[in-house]
Amino acid sequence: MNELRAIDPFSLDPFDDALRSLMRPWRMELPDAAPRIKIDLSEKDGNYAVKAEIPGVQKDDIDVRVDGNTVTISAEVKSDKEEKGNGGRVLRRERQAGYASRSFTLACPVDEGKVQASYKNGILELTLPKKAGVSNKRIAIQ
């Protein structure tokens, strides 16, 4: 059966949809990618507070490193999913392994000895105290 379609002359790329429809028969399902680490960063009472969303990761597979004013959060995903038939024979097995890392730089150095971290329900919470005695001094230009 023929398919009639109206062409929108004001669309940004009229050929994009046409080319995409040509590839429909060959589309395949790609495996899930490694987790993306999404963060919320706030500053309060001389501390930085970080909430990082890392779903599907065990606490032991998360690595947090602080180097001066640079913070790096890394996570490794290891998961297995099996589907078995009635006879106990494996019919389908999907394995996923991935690695995600996220680094960001803060305005002030962090006191590494006082950093606190907790992980619950896929959310990593970090409290990063600013290093004492560090201040920004404005220089007068003459």
Image (cartoon, grey):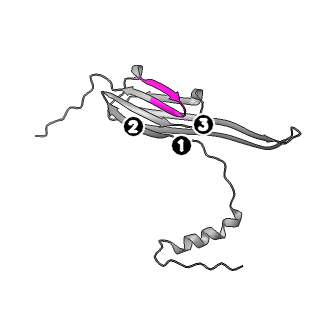
Q: Closer to us: mark 1 or mark 3?
A: 3
Q: Position of residue 15 (x, y in %)?
A: 55, 74
- Magenta highlight on residue 124: yes
Q: Which amino acid, by three-letter code, is at mark 3?
A: Gly
- Residue on which the image places disc 3: 56
Helix, strand, or loop for circle 3?
A: loop
Residue at left offset 43%, top offset 33%: 71
- Residue on which the image places disc 1: 36
Residue at left offset 45%, top offset 39%: 39
User: In this view of the protein, which residue sits in the foreground, 114 or 56?
Assistant: 56
Residue at left offset 47%, top offset 34%: 72
Q: Answer left or right for 9 relative to 105.
A: right
Q: Residues within 10 Å of mark 1 (few under 14, many from 20)?
A: some
Q: In the rendered view, would you say 21 is above or below 7?
A: above
- Residue on which the image places disc 2: 41
Helix, strand, or loop for circle 2?
A: strand
Q: Answer left or right for 59 relative to 109.
A: right
